[in-house]
Amino acid sequence: MDTSSPAVFVNAELLKMYQGRRVRAVVQVMRNEGGLIVGQSTDGHQLTVKVSQAFPLSHFVEVIGIADGNQSIRAEICTDFGDTYDTLAYNGLCQLANGKFKNLFL
Amino acid sequence: MYGSQFDGGASLFSGGGFMPSQATQTPESSFSKSRGAQGVLPLTVKQISEAYHSNDDKSNFVVDGVDASNVRLRGLVMNKVEKVTDVTFTLDDGTGRIEVHRWVNETSDTNEMALIQNGMYVTINGSLKGFQGKKHVVAFSVRPVIDFNEITLHFIECIHVHLENTRPKVLGGVSAQVQANPISGTVTPRTPVSNQFSSRSSSSGSETDFYKLVLDVFQEPANLAREHGLHVEEVARLLGLPMEKIKDAIDYHVDVGHIYSTIDDNHYKSACNG
């Protein structure tokens, strides 16, 4: 087993704290710009994600990759979560996983 | 042909209840085991990495003081390798990676595993094993995640179960246990204990609280169920307190008769369980 490179649950707010680290976030696709997704994070901010494929508009996409800017992620793995997703619950989990219960995740 | 038939027979034989651990089990221990059965514990890989072996049983792990032999994990499948008798892959749940083995005996097992591909989110129910210091999971079932909200749910469940298992047990809970077990009624009257203690050596109230903290560890149902009780080091690790203090508290509880030593001078068990 290996826990050396975890992917931290983040929203746009938490992303800033993990520059250069591995993160995971869910974004709702607003635009595809050729190798780039512009999407909305679970806390309602705009994020750009460098990807290798396009995703359907308004779909929720989970991105696992490296945080390479305050509002940007370089994706390694993308999973289409479909067109409905409970962003409120996910955002709550981001906060719990970085707060009181960090020791269960990192 | 003969060879494969023989192999089939051999695997049936070894899987058919001729496990040494069962054969040598005493009636009491199997009783306490069924009583202590926890079902499936939702965990993160990070939590498993910190789980430690309980000393009395080779295959048992403990997380938050609770037996973690059956676990549920949810994450991405990587490096899937199919062999004749089993399928192995790495599960990455974002907190870490762990090896998973799935034995394929029946056609239904093969069909289930054929669906699983690299990059897929899956839910695994399985048993946690340790082999040469390396932990892995032997899965009973591996199923694709269809509703991705389940990923959020899984981690929220991990937090919930962690909270539930680490919550300080309130006195009410212990007294309910006392009522259920007449023998312990003579053993756990709280107030006389602290009086007795303060007359024995005039220490501060915080030290009595500390003694109670140590006793509470022994009183936890999962620990009561263990045949050999707890190792001193486990108690120290659970409470995150220095060994000398723990040993001091244990000496006290042994003197008073709350706990007793089991297989050696490092293992103690609550007298509460009869």
Image: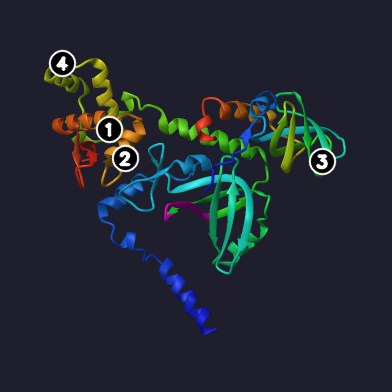
* Magenta span of residues: B131-140
Closer to the observer: label 2 or label 4?
Answer: 4
User: Can I make out residue B128 in this image?
Assistant: no
Describe the element under mark 2 as helix, strand or loop: helix
Task: Tell me the amino acid under the disc marked 2.
Answer: Asn
Q: Between B68 and B241, which is closer to the camera in this rendering?
A: B241
- Residue B243's mark? 1
Describe the element under mark 4 as helix, strand or loop: loop
Is residue B138 one of those drawn in magenta? Answer: yes
Please state the horizontal and vertical placement of residue B54, each as a whole percent of the image: 34, 46
**Are marks 4 and 3 in one subunit?**
no
Work out which residue is located at the far front of the displayed protein and give it: A20
Q: Between A82 and A1, which is closer to the camera in this rendering?
A: A1
Left or right: residue A66 compared with residue B109: right
Task: Tell me the amino acid under the disc marked 3.
Answer: Phe
Left or right: residue A17 compared with residue A102: right
Residue labelled with disc 3: A55
Q: Chain of mark 2?
A: B
Residue labelled with disc 4: B202
